[in-house]
Image (cartoon, helix red, strand yellow):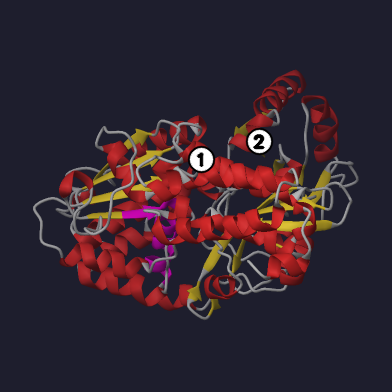
Amino acid sequence: MEHLLYVPLDTAALAMGADAVADAFRAEAARRGLDLRIVRNGSRGLHWLEPLVEIATPAGRVAYGPVTPQDVPSILDAAGKDDATHPLCQGLTEDIPFLKKQERLTFARVGLTDPLSLSDYEAHGGFAGLSKALDMTPEAIVDAITESGLRGRGGAAFPTGVKWRTVLQTQAAQKYIVCNADEGDSGTFSDRMLMEGDPCALIEGMIIAGLAVGATHGYLYVRSEYPQAERVLAGALDAAREAGWLGDDIRRSGRAFDIELRRGAGAYICGEETSLLESLEGRRGLVRAKPPLPAVRGLFGCPTVINNVISLATVPFILAQGAQAYRNFGMGRSRGTLPFQLAGNIRCGGLVEKAFGLTLRELLFDFGGGSASGRPLRAIQVGGPLGAYLPESQWGTPMDYEAFLEISAMLGHGGVVAFDDTVDMASMAEYAMEFCAIESCGKCTPCRIGSVRGTEIIHAIREGRDRENRTELLQDLCDTMMAGSLCALGGMTPYPVLSALRHFPEDFGLSQAAVSQTV
C-alpha cells in the first residue's frame, strides 16, 4: 500500500531543514520496505512548526512539527499505529486552531497541492476562472473585478478595476501586464508563499488580466532574494506553456498571452512601480514623475497594468465564484480578505488570511499567541518599514484601510512586526530614517537629503543635544518629506518616525507635553 507524505518546499521550511527531513523519510521508508510517496507542497503558514510534515490518513492529513531528521523513525512508528500521542503530533491539519479560524480564499490551495502539478491545480478548482474569462468580453471581466471591490494588495490599495479599465480604454498596438513580485518590506512573506505554494494561481490571474485589457505579454518581476520562488515559478510557467494555457493560442481560443520571468537586482526602491518599469527596461531603478500614469504610458511607453502578486492571484477566485462571493467578505470599502503576516517577537509567527475587520489585538493574541519572549508586547509596526508604530491603545483598531488612515497608519502589504517592552523606540525611529537614506534612489531632494539629515537629527536627540528644538526641526523635515517626495519611500518614512515620537516620547528623553507641542 502506498503511503502519502507532504513535506514543504517553501523557503521557510527549507531554512529549517525540510530537504534533510524529506531525505530522512525516504531513507527510513526504504529501510522498512515502505512504499512512500513524498509530495513537496507549499507551506501552510504555521512557521513556528516548520518543517510541518503531513501524513495522509483516511480521516484526513495528520500534521507533525517541527520535524527534524532524528524524529522520522518515531513519526513513522506513530503513524503506523494511528497513535496521536507523539509529542510532535498536531492532530488533523484542518483542525489546528490557527488554520481553522482563517478564511482562505487566495491561499485556499497553498499547502494542499503540489505547486508544480497542473492536474492537482485543476482538481482543486484551478483554471475555472480563466475558463470563464475566455467566454467573456474584456468589459465584462473588468466589471467583475470592479464589482468585487478588489484593491491593490501591494500597499497602495488602489481599486484594481479602475486601473484595469484605464488600460482597457487606452488605445495602443501593444499593452503589458506586469506583476510586481519585488516583495521587499520587512516582516512580509505572503507573495513568496503564494509563488512557492500556488504559482499557477498567479499565472492564471495574469492571463485573465491580459484578456481583460487586451495585453498579450506579461512580465513577472521577482526579487533576487527569492531563488526558490523563481525556481518554482519557472517550472510552473513551463508546465502551463506545455499544457496550452500560455502561448499564441490559449486552449485553442484564438487568444494569446505569454509571461516572461525577470529577476530584480536587490534594490528596495524597485518595489515602487515606476522604478520597477525602469529596471525592466534595463535602466537603473529611478522613480518616474507622474503623470503620465503607467496605465497610460508604462512599460516601453505602452499602457501597462502593474499589480502585486496577491492582487493578481485573487482574480481567479473572483472570476470563478463571482464578484459578490468575494465582496461578501470584509467591511466598508475594504472588501475581501488580506493575508496578514505575523513576524518579529511573536510566539506563533506565520500567515493569517482573514476578512478585513478583525482587530490588530485579535491577530496578535488569538493567532499570534503573544510575544515569543514571554514579555509584554509594547509596539507593533504594521505595513512594512514605512508603517507606523502602534501602541497598545490602538490595537483595537479594525484591520481596514480607512480605519488605519484615521490613526495616521497604513495596512500596506499586511506585514505585522511585534516588539516587546525591551524595544528602544528612538533607535527604531533612527533606523527608519537610516533605511530610507540607504534605499533612496536619489532622484528627489526631500528623500535623498532629508533622510540623511533626519538620521542626524534623531541621533542628536538621542544623545540629549538640544532635544526640544531638534524635535521641532524633525517635524518640519518630516512635513517636507511627506509633501515633496516623488514616491512613498520618502513620503512615508515619517510615519514610523513621528508615530514613535508621538507614542513613546520617553524613549527620546522627552516629555509628552514637549512632544504634543510639535508633533
Q: Which region shows up in magenta? A: 306-321
Question: Magenta span has 48?
Answer: no
The secondary element bearing badge 2 is classed as helix
Judging depth in this view, the residue of 131 and 416 nearest the camera is: 416
User: Is residue 90 shown above or below 137?
Assistant: above
Residue at x-position 77% and y-position 22%: 32
Question: What number of labels is visible?
Answer: 2
Query: Could you tell me if residue 185 is visible in this image?
Result: no
Q: In which quarter of the image is residue 107?
A: bottom right
Q: Position of residue 131 (x, y in %)?
A: 31, 60
Mark earlier in primary sequence (2, 1): 2
Judge from the rendering whether residue 372 lies leftward or rightward of residue 178; answer left or right: right
- In the rendered image, residue 211, in percent from the top left (x then y), is placed at 23, 58
Spot occupied by residue 6 in the image (x, y as percentages of width and height) = 64, 39
Density class for disc 1 (Cα within 10 Å; few <14, some 14-19, many ≥20) is many
Mark 1: amino acid: Ala
Q: Is residue 425 left or right of residue 43?
A: right
Q: Which residue is under mark 2? A: 13
Identify residue type, mark 2: Ala
| Residue shown at the point (47%, 76%) measured from the top left | 327
Q: Which of 400 and 339 is in front in this view?
A: 400
Vertical placement of residue 496 versus 169, above or below:
above
Residue 307 colored magenta? Answer: yes
Q: How crowded is mark 2: few (under 14 residues within 10 Å), some or many (20 or more)?
A: many
The residue that mark 1 highlights is 437
Quadrant where the N terminus is found in the figure = top right
Please state which of the two labelled residues, at mark 2 or mark 1, is closer to the viewer. Answer: 1
Disc 2/disc 1 C-alpha distance (Å): 33 Å
The residue lying at 44 percent from left, 33 percent from top is: 230
Q: Is mark 1 on a helix, strand or loop?
A: helix
The reply, left or right, for residue 182 in relation to residue 186 is left
Confirm or deny contact between disc 2 and disc 1 (CB under 8 A). Answer: no
